[in-house]
Amino acid sequence: MKFKSLSAFALILSFVSCAPHFHLDFLGKDTIEEIVLIPSAAKEKILIIDVTGIIGANLKTGIFTREGDSLSRIYFRLQKASQDNLIKGIVLRIDTPGGEVTACDIIHHEILNFKKKTGIPVLALMMGLGTSGGYYVASACDLIIAHPSTITGSIGVISIFPNFSLLLAKIGVSINVIKSGEMKDSGSAFREITEEEKFIFQGVIDSLYRKFLEAVERGRKGSLNLEELGKIADGRIYTAEQALQLKLIDRIGYFDTALEEILKLSSLKKAKVIAYTYYPKLKTNIYASSLENNSFLEDKNLETILPSLESGFYYLWLPQIRR
């Protein structure tokens, strides 16, 4: 671009330098902050960590989200908490239908690892949903509390293998596959799954299912054995009252119940309740939405979530993938 005079160029520079600069609050801070949700004169802290939405390591997040997937968010907070000597307990607030087998298992492992390294107790507080992988994560905690209206259970594994062969046939598209072995394209979305493939995948499902049951058995500290679990872990969901009767949870209550219990586990009489957030203006109390995990511009419709659920194995209550 050419300017007719230096004065015109100077005028443009002056306008640019004086132009107002805007900061959009919903974008959050550049660095994560510690905020106090419930103040106390005590210096000790109880940390809230949210486990919400579908648990995964590769699921898409909103374009304005400061953080990535749920696995990395939770891991980061556990690591940060382990470096603060004033944190004496963690409330893991769960509101999720579950998610990817591996992501759920890693979170479960990291909670156990955190407790072993720090000696800090972790309590699970289920909100609306604590099903499948959500319950798998909760089983790593020292105590499980559910709200009176919580839906939990759905213990089991599901595998998703879409079949587009009929659709492709309607539009006149065929797929040619060249493979090194008979089972190389097992679970292909371009043809019907064979009985042999079903048998093989069922074997994988059974193995992952047993891993789930064993994790729950260890977490429930002998109150449920594998035989008892097998009778109730057929994938069905339970209300909080039913889960309590079946010994899947320890108590029914609200956040004050959870706070009371985590203080007992931490051998404290009082403590301040904190959270880590990029959105301090939005995270103002224990029930405020933090937008930690999703941008409000992100679409939550079923048809947009389903494509992100790639063929694979999930600890997931599938009817509730819509949030």
Image (cartoon, rainbow, N blue to C red):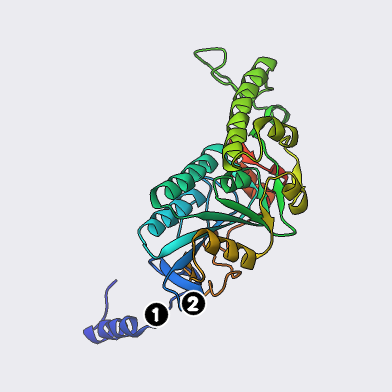
Residue 108, image x, y percentages: 52, 44
In terms of sequence position, does the residue under pointer 2 or pointer 1 come before the other? 1
300 or 238: which is nearer to us? 238
Q: Is residue 263 left or right of residue 256?
A: left
What is the distance, in whole Å, between disc 2 and disc 1 at their CAs? 37 Å
82 or 186: which is nearer to us? 82
Q: Is residue 291 above or below residue 68?
A: below
Which type of secondary structure does the marked residue at label 1 adopt?
loop
Nearest to viewer (mark 2 / mark 1): 2
Who's the residue at 67% across and 49% down the image? 249
Q: Is residue 264 above or below residue 163?
A: below
Q: Is residue 19 left or right of residue 105?
A: left
Who's the residue at 68% across and 18% down the image? 194
On the image, which quarter does residue 218 sit in? top right
Q: Is residue 33 above or below residue 210?
A: below
Q: Is residue 41 left or right of residue 297?
A: left
Residue 5 seen in the figure = yes
Residue 191, image x, y percentages: 66, 23
Which type of secondary structure does the marked residue at label 2 adopt?
loop
Badge 2 amino acid: Ser
224 or 4: which is nearer to us? 224
172 or 270: which is nearer to us? 270
Q: List the residue tagged with mark 1.
A: 21
Residue 44, image x, y percentages: 43, 69
On the image, which quarter does residue 3 sit in? bottom left
Which numbered circle lies on residue 195? none
On the image, which quarter does residue 4 sit in? bottom left
Badge 1 amino acid: His
Q: List the residue tagged with mark 2.
A: 40
Residue 232, image x, y percentages: 74, 37
